[in-house]
């Protein structure tokens, strides 16, 4: 487009991110090709558009506005054109997705991320690794990251770029697991273009499980070191100390039920 704005989804080649649907002769998977058509046609008008946000709204508030705007556009587009897909808003605030799309037997959990192209370095949270592991036990579930980039202009934002990519299409150089809750999958650096994972969904999942195990191993080692420091602060005592978890700790670092 002459404005320089861009909108695209990553095409899925044969053997890539398995969505449980047969591959077409041209190498694309039917459900993903259909998803790309829906999102492209629903969101093309958002490019270079001005969205009023107000002068006092911070980045998190802008993210909420963009998420709501994108969700409404997609749901209304599917309804107006009677497309063979269903779209709905999340049932609770703790839902994984901002938008739930059912396309040709595949359920896309769409996570909308808004980024200020003039903003500072950031590592956006995607999902708990525990929740992702449970979500991906079903082959027909796909976590889709939909990225909306914008610039601020007074009380408005101007959308400059829209892209989407399934999480298993993102290479591990672009991802990290951070020590938050049971482990949080994050984008390593939102200012950089996401790299593509060269492999299928099963290969990505094997790497994901290995990364998760390494994270828990490192977290356990840190916890044991912290325990030693805290036990050392107690000092010498003649008897074990009863703690709230109904576990007795002696001062040599051993536990007794």
Image (tube, rainbow, N blue to C red):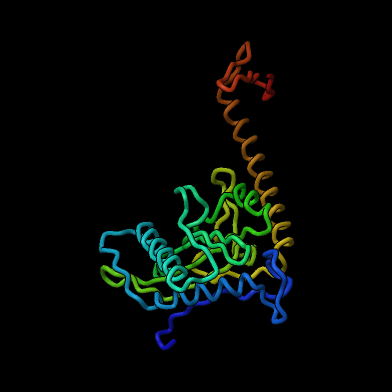
Note whether 108 is above or below 214 in the view shown.
below
136 left or right of 161? right
31 or 59: which is nearer to us? 31
Task: Measuring from the top left, give residue 222's x and y in whole percent.
Answer: 62, 40
64 left or right of 153? right
Note whether 240 is above or below 171 in the view shown.
above
Residue occupying image coordinates x 42% and y 71% = 80
205 or 75: which is nearer to us? 75
Residue occupying image coordinates x 54% and y 46% = 180
Q: Residue furthest top?
A: 238
101 left or right of 119? right
Q: Quadrant of residue 240?
A: top right
Task: Measuring from the top left, give residue 230's x and y in whole percent.
Answer: 57, 28
107 or 156: which is nearer to us? 107
Total residue callouts? 0
52 or 104: which is nearer to us? 104
Q: Residue furthest front?
A: 82
Residue occupying image coordinates x 44% and y 71% = 77
Note whether 116 is above or below 253 in the view shown.
below
């Amino acid at each position: 487009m002459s404005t320089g704005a861009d909108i695209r989804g990553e095409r899925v080649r044969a053997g890539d991110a398995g969505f449980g649907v047969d591959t077409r002769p041209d190498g694309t998977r039917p459900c993903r090709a259909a998803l790309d058509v829906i999102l492209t046609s629903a969101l093309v008008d958002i490019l270079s558009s001005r969205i009023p946000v107000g002068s006092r709204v911070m980045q998190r508030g802008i993210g909420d506005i963009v998420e709501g705007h994108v969700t409404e556009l997609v749901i209304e587009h599917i309804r107006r054109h009677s497309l063979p897909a269903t779209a709905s808003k999340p049932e609770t605030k703790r839902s994984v997705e901002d938008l739930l799309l059912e396309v040709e037997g595949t359920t896309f959990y769409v996570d909308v991320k808004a980024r200020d192209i003039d903003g500072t370095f950031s590592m956006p949270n995607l999902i708990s690794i525990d929740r992702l592991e449970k979500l991906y036990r079903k082959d027909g579930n796909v976590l889709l990251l939909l990225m909306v980039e914008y610039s601020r202009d007074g009380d408005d934002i101007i959308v400059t770029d829209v892209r989407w990519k399934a999480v298993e299409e993102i290479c591990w150089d672009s991802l990290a697991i951070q020590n938050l809750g049971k482990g949080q999958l994050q984008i390593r650096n939102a200012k950089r273009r996401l790299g593509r994972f060269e492999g299928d969904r099963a290969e990505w999942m094997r790497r994901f499980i290995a990364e998760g195990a390494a994270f828990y191993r490192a977290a356990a080692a840190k916890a044991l070191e912290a325990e030693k420091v805290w036990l050392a602060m107690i000092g010498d005592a003649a008897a074990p100390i009863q703690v709230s978890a109904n576990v007795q700790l002696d001062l040599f670092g051993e536990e007794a039920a």
